[in-house]
Image (cartoon, rainbow, N blue to C red):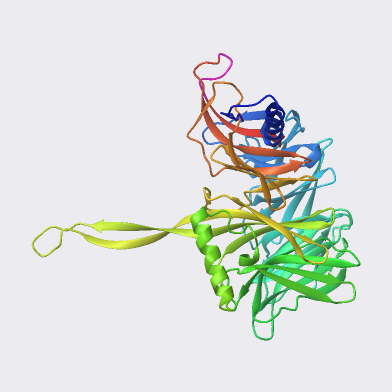
Amino acid sequence: MCKTFTLRAIFSPGSWLLLAWFMVIAIASDAQIIQPDRVEIELDDYDDYYTVISAREEGLVLVRQVENKTEPRKNNWEVLKYNTDLTLSWRRNLLVNINYDFTGYEYRNGKVYLLYKPVNYQNDKMILQVLSLGTGNMEEAEINYVFPLNLTEFTVSGNAAILGGYVNYMPAVIHYDLSSKKVKVLPGIYNNRSELVDISVDEDTGIFNILVTEKTFDKRNTLAIKTFDQNGTLLQNRTLETKGTNNIIFGRSTRFNAREQFIAGTYSNNKSSYSSGIFIAKLDALGGQDITYISYGDLKNFFSYMKAKREARVRDRINRRRVQGKKVKFRYRLLVHDIVEKDDMFLLFGEAFYPKYNNTALSSIAYGPYFPRGRWGDNMYFAGYKYTHAVVVAFNKKGKVLWDNSFEINDVTSFSLDQYVNASIEEKRVILLYLYENVIRSKLINEDEILEGKTFDDIKMKFEDDVAKNNDYEIGGLSLWYDKFFYAYGVQRIKNLKDREAKLSRKVFYINKITYQ
């Protein structure tokens, strides 16, 4: 990305040192997007697209269904393994019974786990394939369970697969040991008054946390944290003790240790499903807990995504309410991501959104002396989730907020709730990135300061004169890969009228490697 600066001034000889200093500052802060590698896979019009799986420093794994010309009762799943320079390492084709569909994946310690669920929920088993990234060798297991599970969560802990979902609208979690082939239902989760919120695994120890909602005696929402080792043994069972009329909506957990653990997420007032702010709960080894509630109005930069005049009006309203001794009630939907631990602090990331509905007027025209010229009625339809901004809140090991910042993403509308903004955390800066309509949006912050505002960089093409046309923007995204690297992927229809080595027209599935300097 190129930036230009224009300086108009009359300088004295001694002022050139000052000019040189300002130029050094300008160059140092002029960080830019770098896209060192790109791979394209040409597609026919009716080809399926790839699911992209990060294997971190070991590369990327791509999975899609392709035509099977040999066995009519099986589906053919193509698996490609790419190195970190986006060169192809190996390719495999996996045959799976046509009654099963690819539904989940996980990467752990040199292996990729591919999960296939039955198309018919009455079937009592799932298929799990484990691929070694070094060789491409595959082992397959059938996970039998005693009841049909509507799957919503899949992860791996040690040598066990953890499957979470709902049975008869009640949450349940299954532990499957890959060595012994034994299945067990984890205790304390199957409850008709609760919902499965999250399953998170500490990759170093295999210990995992399951978060489920629970009802208090006065029918407010709170969270129960159930901690298990990799063998499925219950280590700890805690419930957050909420204060006042606060209602816990959603939460994420940090890794479990013997001294302390943090749960952070969103809360509301008076049982509302809209969040009013974030909470941070500190749990200690002796059973004590301390919960801090932070209203969105108490965060310094939560409303920075707004235009300046609108933000000023919101701040004025908050201040007036405080002077009157009243609270401002906020109504936000916040998609909360994982908590990232960095040195002596934790970073909580989330994205604010709202469901968007459009109003279409339908005209019914009738002719004759007894009918008006037109009859109009309103037809409301769901038009996707409109994202407004991403937020990052840092807190220390005492549960105290250190700083916060935000990143406007008000150009994104999606029909699925996905994570758009990803972050790379360095010593003195955080890089926030997301991809939308073939353009990388980025922002560079240091705690609550903005080092570089929102910038825009086009996805780098393979050839100089490539022009992307008629893209499927619903396919693709941008994710953190490893270290300071991200990967962006999607589908493009490309025209090229000049480069001899390029086709005149091609449809490709692309992956670009991205970093920030």
In the image, what residue occupies the spot 62% across and 33% down? Answer: 510
Is residue 82 among the parts visible in the rendering? yes
- Quick one: 298 or 5, which is closer to the camera? 5
Name the dominant secondary structure of the magenta segment. loop
Which residue is the extreme one toward the top?
500
Horizontal and vertical percent position of residue 166: 67, 67
Does 300 lie within the magenta span? no
Q: Is residue 200 above or below residue 330?
A: above
Horizontal and vertical percent position of residue 351: 62, 56
Horizontal and vertical percent position of residue 82: 74, 33
Q: Quadrant of residue 439?
A: top right
Image quadrant containing the N terminus: top right
What is the magenta range? 500-505
Q: Quadrant of residue 254?
A: bottom right
Horizontal and vertical percent position of residue 24: 71, 31
In the image, what residue occupies the spot 72% across and 52% down? Answer: 447
Which residue is the extreme one toward the left?
369
Is residue 161 among the parts visible in the rendering? no
Q: Is residue 91 above or below residue 261?
A: above
Q: Is residue 274 rendered to the left or right of residue 149?
A: left
Image quadrant containing the C terminus: top right
- Quick one: 200 or 308, which is closer to the camera? 308
- Quick one: 69 or 242, which is closer to the camera? 242
Q: Is residue 349 rendered to the left or right of residue 439?
A: right
Q: How many marks?
A: 0
- Quick one: 142 or 73, which is closer to the camera? 142
In the image, what residue occupies the spot 70% across and 35% down? Answer: 25
